[in-house]
Image (tube, helix red, strand yellow):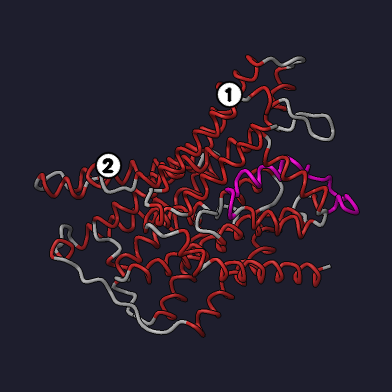
């Protein structure tokens, strides 16, 4: 039990190191990698103590270990069985899930960086003339909200943060706008079956259907985005300063035709990903890498007759040198850490405690949403999906909440999707923005967290009122 508790202590210390990145002057990627790896080391060393823990029903606390034991028909598991489970089964299972996110992120970042290197975003930023902060905030938030539903919140955030670099010179102002982009991206992703990893999970798992999630969650999602924007409309003043381009950035390496071609290919390549997933049922990262491969081939052919220097700048090989690999490592560390807590049974214990001590499905989901700002929302939703079975059609009483398209699943999609905005590392979109713009955790906590929380609760209230009116 001591080692089980030690894992929580280590997680809190590692989390604090990530949050205090700027004061302690240690990059969050280093803290996240150490945190993730140390938790797995503790789990493998103390595997007998941790995996032998039982819940109130006399079953193993770790859900994944329980399924493994039943699946392999192991009656009296030994330390060797536990070692095999961790090293050959569970780590590989989590690595597969984490890798799909990392390769998706790497592909999306490379496509966006390629468009940027070809000055493709100039075609969009030249159309946005306003320098009024409030007007720009509304334009970018609405654009993000609907783009996020069509692409997904992670890809949309990467695209919009790249755009912001061309629109806003001052770093803190850019941080503020990037943070509001994260809020809008998470709100836009929650009501679309392909807008967020958690809604994709619920859609594929059969807990929700595409048409229903759109009709039932779009209004609360709009409220979540609009309420913080209305607050800022009355409190925010002033104008932004456009960045002054240096000679290198002013110099046009590409023709207007090349810029337009790569921009259109980049946008179509990103839009192709959800279509690819729907048609082939293969993971989204494969669609993203296919899009990247086609754009890579195009840039190689497009620039093959140019000078070596221009080719190095404009082909994907040159662009890859500019991609922020530290963000990839940060993702790897934080997702590995949460995966270790999931394997050890911490998240199952938390889910069970919520069920026994709270009971009210609205409150349970609200708490899951707030927790998803601290712990990644993917394992939390996975835990909820594992905890509650989909009830049969026609179920009555408490069970009726858990039928397909039931209130529990709809509200879970909303809460898990938007609750992550409360902290910068609570969502994939937030982590990507944090990595790209080096946003300070404490700065976000002071300036954005309360706005995000107000929006989150307002959207939840809108969902509750909507249900009351329907029923």
Of residues 243 and 305, the one nearer the viewer is: 243
Q: Which residue is mark 2?
A: 297
Give the SS element for disc 1. Answer: helix
- The residue shown at (73%, 27%) is 66
Quadrant housing the N terminus: top right
Quadrant housing the C terminus: bottom right
Of residues 304 and 47, the one nearer the viewer is: 47
446 sits left or right of 198 in the view: left
- The residue shown at (31%, 46%) is 295
Q: Is residue 342 magenta?
A: no
Please rate how many residues cluster around mark 1, counting C-alpha atoms within 10 Å: few if below 14, some from 14 to 19, many from 20. few
- The residue shown at (47%, 76%) is 138
Of residues 300 and 348, the one nearer the viewer is: 348
184 sits left or right of 459 in the view: left
x, y percent for residue 69: 72, 21
Of all residues shown, which one is farthest toward the right? 397
x, y percent for residue 326: 36, 45
Q: Which residue is mark 1?
A: 45
Identify the magenta region: 373-400
Of residues 324 and 197, the one nearer the viewer is: 324
x, y percent for residue 266: 35, 54
């Amino acid at each position: 039990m001591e080692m089980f508790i030690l894992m929580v202590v280590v997680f809190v210390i590692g989390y604090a190191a990530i949050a205090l990145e700027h004061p302690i002057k240690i990059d969050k990627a280093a803290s996240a990698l150490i945190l993730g790896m140390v938790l797995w080391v503790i789990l493998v060393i103390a595997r007998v103590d941790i995996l032998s823990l039982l819940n109130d029903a006399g079953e193993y606390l770790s859900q994944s270990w329980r399924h493994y034991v039943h699946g392999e028909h192991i009656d009296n598991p030994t330390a060797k069985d536990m070692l095999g489970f961790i090293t050959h089964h569970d780590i590989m299972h989590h690595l597969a899930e984490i890798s799909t996110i990392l390769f998706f992120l790497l592909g999306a970042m490379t496509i966006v960086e390629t468009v940027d290197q070809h000055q493709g975003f100039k075609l969009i930023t030249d159309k946005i003339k306003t320098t009024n902060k409030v007007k720009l905030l509304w334009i970018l938030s609405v654009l993000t909200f609907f783009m996020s539903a069509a692409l997904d919140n992670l890809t949309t955030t990467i695209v919009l943060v790249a755009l912001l670099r061309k629109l806003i010179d001052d770093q803190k102002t850019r941080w503020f706008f990037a943070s509001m982009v994260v809020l809008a991206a998470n709100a836009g992703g929650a009501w679309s079956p392909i807008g967020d990893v958690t809604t994709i999970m619920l859609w594929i798992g059969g807990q929700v259907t595409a048409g229903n999630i759109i009709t039932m969650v779009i209004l609360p999602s709009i409220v979540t985005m609009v309420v913080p924007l209305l607050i800022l409309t009355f409190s925010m003043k002033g104008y932004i300063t456009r960045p002054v381009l240096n000679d290198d950035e002013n110099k046009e390496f590409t023709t207007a035709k090349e810029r337009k071609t790569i921009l259109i290919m980049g946008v179509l390549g990103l839009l192709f990903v959800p279509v690819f997933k729907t048609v082939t049922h293969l993971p989204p990262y494969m669609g993203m890498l296919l899009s990247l491969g086609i754009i890579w081939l195009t840039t190689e052919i497009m620039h093959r007759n140019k000078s070596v220097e221009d080719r190095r700048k404009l082909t994907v090989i040159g662009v890859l040198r500019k991609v922020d690999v530290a963000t990839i490592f940060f993702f790897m560390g934080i997702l590995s850490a949460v995966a270790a807590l999931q394997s050890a049974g911490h998240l199952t214990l938390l889910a069970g405690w919520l069920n026994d001590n709270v009971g009210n499905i609205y409150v349970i989901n609200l708490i899951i949403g707030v927790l998803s700002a601290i712990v990644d929302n993917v394992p939390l939703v996975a835990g909820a999906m594992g905890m509650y079975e989909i009830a049969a059609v026609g179920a009555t009483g408490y069970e009726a909440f858990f039928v397909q398209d039931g209130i529990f699943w709809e509200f879970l999609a909303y809460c898990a999707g938007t609750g992550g905005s409360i902290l910068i590392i609570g969502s994939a979109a937030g982590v990507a923005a944090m990595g790209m713009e080096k946003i300070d955790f404490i700065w976000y906590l002071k300036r954005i967290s309360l706005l995000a929380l107000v929006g989150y609760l307002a959207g939840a209230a809108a969902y509750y009122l909507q249900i009351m009116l329907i029923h």
